[in-house]
Amino acid sequence: MNSFASLLTKPMLIGLTLVLGFSSGVPNAQAAQQRDVEGIAAIVNDKVISLFDVDQRVDLFFATSGIAKSPDMTERMRAQVLRSLVDEKLQLEEANRVEIAIKDKEVEDRMKTLATEGKMTLKGIKEFLAEKNIETESLEQQLRAELAWSQFVRRSFSGRVKVGDQEIDEQYNKAVRAVNQTRFLLSEILLNLDSFSNEQQVEKLSGEIVKQLQSGVDFGAVARQFSIAPTAARGGQLGWITADQLDRRLASVVRQMKPGQVSAPIPTNAGLYIIALADKRAGGNDPSKNQFDVLSLTFPKDSKPSKIDKFAADFKTCRRAQQSAKKAKALAKRTGLRELRQLPRQIANAVGNLEAGRLSVPITTPDGIELYAVCDRKDDLGIEISRSQISENIFSQRVSMMARRHLRDLRRDAVVEYR
């Protein structure tokens, strides 16, 4: 899949009835016939959503999600795509109510950012869409709604969320206690159970998503399209965490998973989770990840031991040793900072227990007599714990929850006429 495709920010809840054939009461064949005749899909308060808008967004969904497209799947997607467009109208209306207006340049800048992240150009994005017969305006409308809603959420809810020092300390201390525990590199997809009318829908959708992921569909792309978690914008990536940092139901599943696996759907109070485990490693620091900057000095084989001993005794700094190496007829070569596991085994064995500024004992090799100096050393500290990051995570989760509730209220109060 094109790298730009996997970077698109998710449309609001697009695809949550992927295999359900969500119906407005009109059979598929009849619905297709009505589209050809009427031209209007829905009216949200007084704003029109055209059938062309729906078709374009369905095509955009398939182009950016990696989900295989078929006539039957396309028809099944239409109702949920329409719901997504209804949400966008409500979001834009709410933003306009508080005088938030997104300028064309802001939309273009967002598209340029997507292009840069996807190693493309703005022209490349437009060519990608043209190849899929998707008008650029369809993507622009989606981005405009996302930018407007993001500004509205920040303005409306950020000032109402307070994260206390006690909460941060509790999370920080919990993370510190977990330093020596096994860590997991995880990604998540969180499905909103409010979007389903019964358990059968939940089972069908979540099972189909897992099936698609296990068949090779990019997890990050699907997370951006489907997930309602704050991590959706970064492809669902949670980063390195311990099991104790997860909901207990997620933790029990993650502990049993192997790297490369995607979990079955996991029900929680927040919604339905799908977890992907990319890697895991034992807790604590990893000595093989300690970084060393090593100066290798190779003396001729016939060098007298006393000459090498004198060179070692006079050693002060790597820079000075490099300058005096020629006079001693020694070949000097510096590695730069590299992890211990990345250094040649002979060097790694010689310097692994040395501090910066220390020399190894002379070693006889086929190339001559070698001496290794540790110019710099930076040890792996294991998991990095930041109070500011903990605060940001708590804050973003609460703001996201408030935004979801507000959108749900807007849907409830809106006058929506489906055609």
Image: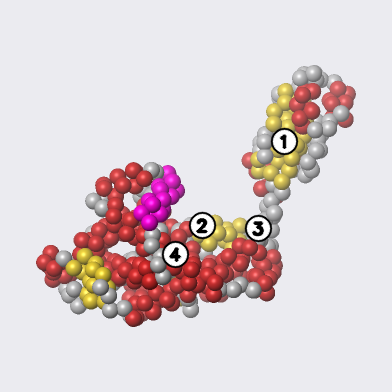
Mark 4–mark 3 Cα distance, whole angstroms, equals: 29 Å
Q: Amino acid at mark 2?
A: Ala
Q: Is residue 291 above or below residue 250?
A: above
Helix, strand or loop at label 3? It is loop
Q: Earlier in the sequence, mark 2 or mark 3?
A: 2
Q: Amino acid at mark 4?
A: Ser
Mark 1 sits on what residue? 294
Residue name at image x 58 percent, y 59 percent: 240
Q: Which residues are magenta?
A: 103-119
Mark 3 sits on what residue? 384
Image quarter (top left, top right, bottom left or bottom right) of the C terminus? bottom left
Q: Earlier in the sequence, mark 2 or mark 4?
A: 4
How many residues crowd around disc 1 within 10 Å: few (fewer than 14), some, or many (20 or more)? many
Residue name at image x 66 percent, y 61 percent: 385
Residue 413: x and y in percent read 34, 81
Residue 306: x and y in percent read 88, 24
| In front: label 4 or label 3 | 4
Q: Is residue 394 left or right of residue 228?
A: right
Mark 4 sits on what residue? 150
Q: Is residue 283 left or right of residue 21?
A: right
Residue name at image x 54 percent, y 75 percent: 160
How many residues crowd around disc 4 within 10 Å: few (fewer than 14), some, or many (20 or more)? some
Residue 54: x and y in percent read 24, 63
Mark 2 sits on what residue? 278
Helix, strand or loop at label 1? It is strand
Residue name at image x 38 percent, y 43 percent: 121
Helix, strand or loop at label 2? It is strand
Mark 1–mark 4 Cα distance, whole angstroms, equals: 49 Å
Mark 2–mark 3 Cα distance, whole angstroms, equals: 19 Å
Q: Earlier in the sequence, mark 1 or mark 4?
A: 4
Give the quadrant of residue 222: bottom left
Q: Amino acid at mark 3?
A: Glu
